[in-house]
Each structure stands twice: as structure tokens, then as C-alpha cells.
Image (cartoon, coloured by chain):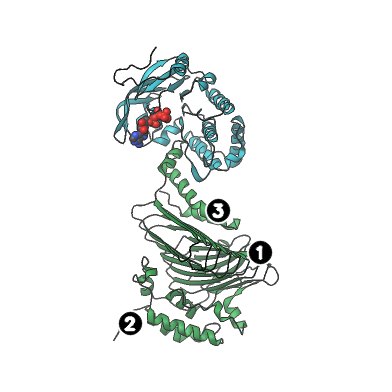
Chain colours: A cyan, B green
Amino acid sequence: MLDIRNLHVSVDGKPILKGLDLSVKAGEVHAIMGPNGSGKSTLAHVLAGREGYVVSSGEILYQGSNLLELNVEERAQQGILLAFQYPVEIPGVANVYFLKAALNALRRHRGLPELDAIDFLALIRNKLKQMEMDESLLYRPVNQGFSGGEKKRNEILQMVLLEPTLALLDESDSGLDIDALKVVAAGINGLRSPQRAIVLVTHYQRLLDYVVPDKVHVLADGRIARSGGRELAIELERTGYGTPADHPGRQAATP
Amino acid sequence: MNARVPGSAADYLGAFRRISGILPGQHLDWLRQARAEAIGRFSQQGFPTLHDEDWKYTSVASIEKGRFNILPTASDNLLAPQVALHALPDSHLLVFVNGRLDPGLSRPGRLPPGTVLSSLAYQLEQDQDWPEDTLVTYPPASPFADLNLAFMADGAYVRLPPEAALAAPIQLLFITSEANLAVQPRNLLVAGAGSSASIVEQHVALGESSYFTNTVTDILVGSGATLEHHKVQQESPAAFHIATVNVSQAAKSRFTSTSFALGARLARTGIAVKFQAEDAHCTLDGLYLSDGRQHVDHHTWIDHQKPRCTSRELYKGILNGASRAVFNGRVVVHPDAQGSDAQQTNHNLLLSENAEIDTKPQLEIWADDVKCSHGATVGQLDEDQVYYLRARGIGEASARVILTRAFAKEIIDRVGPLSLQERLDQLLQHKLPRQ
Ligand SMILES: Nc1ncnc2c1ncn2[C@@H]1O[C@H](COP(=O)(O)OP(=O)(O)OP(=O)(O)O)[C@@H](O)[C@H]1O
Ligand SMILES: [Mg+2]
């Protein structure tokens, strides 16, 4: 589903991804871990199509075609959804209006009739229940004044509503209490299917107890430094990432 | 010999001499004299120029050059459906066509006892001892206020008796259908002690012709009264609109003004609020939308004359094309006005590189125990927000419209009457650039 080869990306002239390779097949769940500032969110935004990222070499194939030719909304319409590490607040736009506009944009693209207010409300109420979210969050401005956990739940709400083909979840577990973590994990697990792929960026093994990944990668200094099964996450939890590989005189911590 | 420029101040003097006999209220000595003095001052001073501090950013040369008829040629037969287009479903409605009340189209409805909703011309003709100071203010707000005083022929007269509370809004609908007309409405709104009401003053056009609206609205808010004044300016794209709003507030009164500037080629609204007694509050909000070569100017002036009054101002502008907007917010706190609290905010969204905004706070503080703040921003849409919407599959153009609308919505949501909120929301959807 997703093939990234030798990806080099810089932001404001600063190289951040430096030859990243990653391959994710339909049906798989991959976890990406790695130290702060190693480029995980950068990778997520490059996949979502955010402007300002310069791809100087390498390629990204999504479902066999060149992803870099598509703009942000086209990628979303083709089934890519990025749950933001820092969801954006939009004063003046009611959450319910935003969610409906998003769903109907995708439906239009797929040649399906748009949902009217009544049908949409019935649908979104179900999803809210699934996410154990209060209905009042529908009528507040998008993410504005939401608590950290509410923001993350709202991202996962969008995921269960929009049912992406490739879900990129950037630290959707950060800042969640233990009950919220279970709800978010259930949301992610509910989406797992042979037709879909999920990439989780996380700092904690905890999420992976609930959402068991097929593969775990360590992104360090703009590259995939290590890959393995779920046991790699357990090991990292114990040992940490150690000193960066390019630190003079030291090797990355590999026992 | 001085050449006579068409439309110059001298021409207005000539017109005044010809028609002043038929203006309403000429049996009142003080009014006859005040009109004569006003036109005298105006013909000497002429129109303001860019050299006048208050008109530095707004040239009215095009109004000066225009030739406008002082009297409407014939009464226009407006059809009820054209009025229905603008009438709010629940309002006490007065309709003015080309500056004159049209009783047939009006629908004042049932009002609390003692409430007067009437035409100024009618009231002036009826009344033998009209209080002079309600219509004549010295010094005049501007040459345009003098011009209005000289020629005012009609307008709304609203008087709320003490403690009257109106559930539905009063709507004053000014419709101009005649090209090249100078319409000079004069409104007097008086809210008795403890009364409460919302008054909508709306200026619309039939067609796209050029004309000149020069309106003055005097508002007296009695002690403990709560009054909302919502001004909706939807003049024709070729029209000129100059508005002067003078507000005088008694103790513990609350006044809210929203000014929506949506139409006209050149529009200027000046709102002056005077706190005449303690513990009063005013909120002045506004939203201006400009496109093409439109010019829209708001000048507000809040005069904190007495202690412990509070004022809040939020003006927002959306500028497109090669349009230009002006916001000048003057706040004066007098030496005695201890405990004054004034906040002023002006946010502007520039959707085009060729649009221009001049925003200027003007704070004159002469007391020590005061809280005063102001802030202005000029910017574009937040690109992170645009990205977030696009990342959910919403096309870029729609994302920008959604965000622009949200920017404006903050002001619309502050309007009291829900029927007006809905109407403004629809208007906005039509007006916002599609990009
Ligand atoms: N606009 C920018 N200009 C310069 N540097 C940038 C810019 N945006 C991101 N960076 C840098 O790129 C690096 C990678 O950032 P990124 O957000 O991808 O890290 P991350 O792996 O997601 O970290 P975290 O775990 O803290 O979320 C950081 O050093 C960051 O400071
Ligand atoms: Mg990150």
C-alpha cells in the first residue's frame, strides 16, 4: 500500500529526513518510535501533503502511484488520514459542521450522495458513543478549548467517521488517561481490516499492548535505524534509544 | 469670479433657498434658524478634505463632484414583495422609500402602551414645542451632519416609555430606488428609563444606480435602559453612504451597536458615544466587507465623561480586490472619569495583495485610575487551519470560504435578534469571495 524509498526531505533548508525507507502492506499495523525531533511528525506531514516540505530525492508510492503528485485534499480523498499530534483549533467553526463537511467532501469524491443534517447527526452520535465523547463537543468550535485528551479523541472520532484506507496516527496516545487510551485503542482496532493499513507514531509501549503492531520501527536522525516485531518496542521501553548513532565515539544502544 | 463647480457646497445653498419652505418643522423658530445656520456653515466650509484630520484616509471628492437631486421626482410604487425581501419576519417595520415614510408598506405591529414608532416629519409637524437639543448638537459632528440638518425631510421617530420592553426588533428599512438622489434621513431614537429594545437600521437599494445617502441617527439611552442599534448598510454598488450616529447614555444604561458595512462604493460611518453619567456600558461591534474598488470607513468615538463606565469594541474587516478600509477608534477618558474601562480590538483579513487597511487607535487618557487596552491585527487566513481542513478532504477554495465565514461569524453571533442573525448569515454567504 505504501512504499517509501530513500526519502530525503528538508524544511526551511534544514535536512530532516535523510534517506528513509518504509514499506507498509494492506492489512498491516506499523509502529514508528524514535527520539524527539527525529522526524516522525515530518514524515507524517509529508505523507499528508503539507506544503513547505521539500522532497529533494526519493519516492513515495501509495497504492502503486506517485503520492507526491497529489495535493493535500486529493490525498485525503484517496483515503489517507493523518491524526495530528497537535490538532488545530478553528474558532468560529462548529465541530459538527466541520465533521459533516469532511464526510460529505469524501462522499462527493466517491460519487455517493451527501448526507443531510439529520442522517449525519444519527451517524455521528453513534461514533461519539463509540469514542465515549460528550455530545456537547459537537457544538463547540473545532478543538477550541478542548482538553488535550478531548483533542486526541476528536482526531480518532474523525478517523472512525471517515474510515481511511491509510491511517497515520501521530502520537494519538499522548496525554491520554488509561480509560481514554482503551477507547482510542478500540477505535483503532475497529478499523483494522485486510484492506487498510495503519501507521502509529508513539513513544510508549503501552498503546501497543492494546493495538498489537505487525512491525515496529525506530526512526532516528531521519532514517529508519532499526526494525523488528513487537518485541522491539518492549526492549526499547527497557533500554531507551541510547545515544544517537552519529554521536562521536558511540554506537546506538543495541545490546 | 469663482467658477461654480457642479455639486459644490454653493449649489447646496442654492437648493436650500429654493426648497427650505417645504421642509418639515419650519414653523418651529429654533429649527428654521438651526437649518439656516447649518447650511450657512456648510456652504462656507464645504466638504471635508484629506487635510481634515478626521477625513485623512477618506476622500469625499466624488461626492462633492456628484450632482444629486435634493427632492425625489415622484413617489415610487414599490411592490410589497420587494419589501418582503428585506423585512425581518418578526419586526415592527417602518419602510422609507427614497427618504420618506411609506405608511402602506410599513407594518408597525402591536407595541407596548406609550411606545411611539412614527415618522420624524409627522412628529415635527404635530409638535409645537419640540426640545431643541434633541436635534441640534454643537459643534456639529461633521459638515455632513450640517448638511443633514439643513435638508432632513423625514426619518424614524422612536420613543420607548420608561420600563417598556420590546420582544421583537424595530426595523427601519430605508429603500432607495431613484438614481442621483441625495437621501438625508434623520432618525431620533429615545429609550426611556429602564426600557429595552433592539432597533435595526437598514439601508438597501433597488437596482444598482448611483445616489447619495447622508443619514444622521440620534440616540438617547435613558438611565438603566438597554438599547441595541444594528446598522446594516447594503447600498447599491455605485452609491455613496455617509452615516453619523450620535449616542448619549444616562446612568447605568447599556448600549450595543453593530455596524455591518456590506455595500456602497464609498461608505463612512461615524459613531460617537457620550457617557453623560456614571456606570454606563457600551459595546460597539462592526463588520465590513469590501471588494473591487470599494472604500469603507468606520470612525468611532467613545467619550468617557463620567466615572466607572465601560466600553468594548470589536471591529472586523474582510478586504478583497483593490478595496480600502479605514478603522479609527477614538477613546477619550476625561479627568473625572475614574474607574473607566475601555477595550478596543480591530482584526482585518486581507484576502488580496491589493487591498489596504488603515487602522488607528486614538486613546486620550486624562484620568489615572483607568483600564484601557487596544489591539489591531492585519493578516491572512491561518494556513495551519487551511491545511487541517484540506487534510480532511475539503477542497482548498471551500476551506478558505469556511474560515473567512468563521472570521465574520463572531460579529454576526453578537447580534441580538435571531431573525437578523439568520439574515446576515445568508447575506454573508452571498457576499464572501468564492476564490
Ligand atoms: N519549519 C521548520 N524549520 C526548521 N526546523 C524544523 C521545522 N519543522 C520541524 N523542524 C525540525 O525538524 C525536526 C523533526 O521534527 P519532527 O516534528 O518531525 O520530530 P518528531 O520526531 O515528530 O518529534 P516529537 O517526538 O517530539 O514529536 C526537529 O528538530 C524540528 O525542530
Ligand atoms: Mg512529532
Protein chain holding label 2:
B
> Between marks 1 and 2, how big is the CA–CA gap?
51 Å
| Camera-side residue of B223 and B213 | B223
Q: What element carries label 1?
A: loop
Three-letter residue code for mark 1: Leu
Q: Give the label on residue B4, or none.
A: 2
Protein chain holding label 1:
B
Viewer-nearest of discs 1 and 2: 1
Same chain? Circles 3 and 2: yes
Q: Is residue B316 visible?
A: no
Which of the marked residues, 3 or 2, is nearer the chain's N terminus? Answer: 2
Three-letter residue code for mark 2: Arg
Q: Is residue B296 visible?
A: yes
Label 2 packing within 10 angstroms: few (<14), some (14-19), many (20+):
few
**Quadrant (top left, top right, bottom left, bottom right) of the N terminus of chain A:** top left
Residue at the extreme top: A255
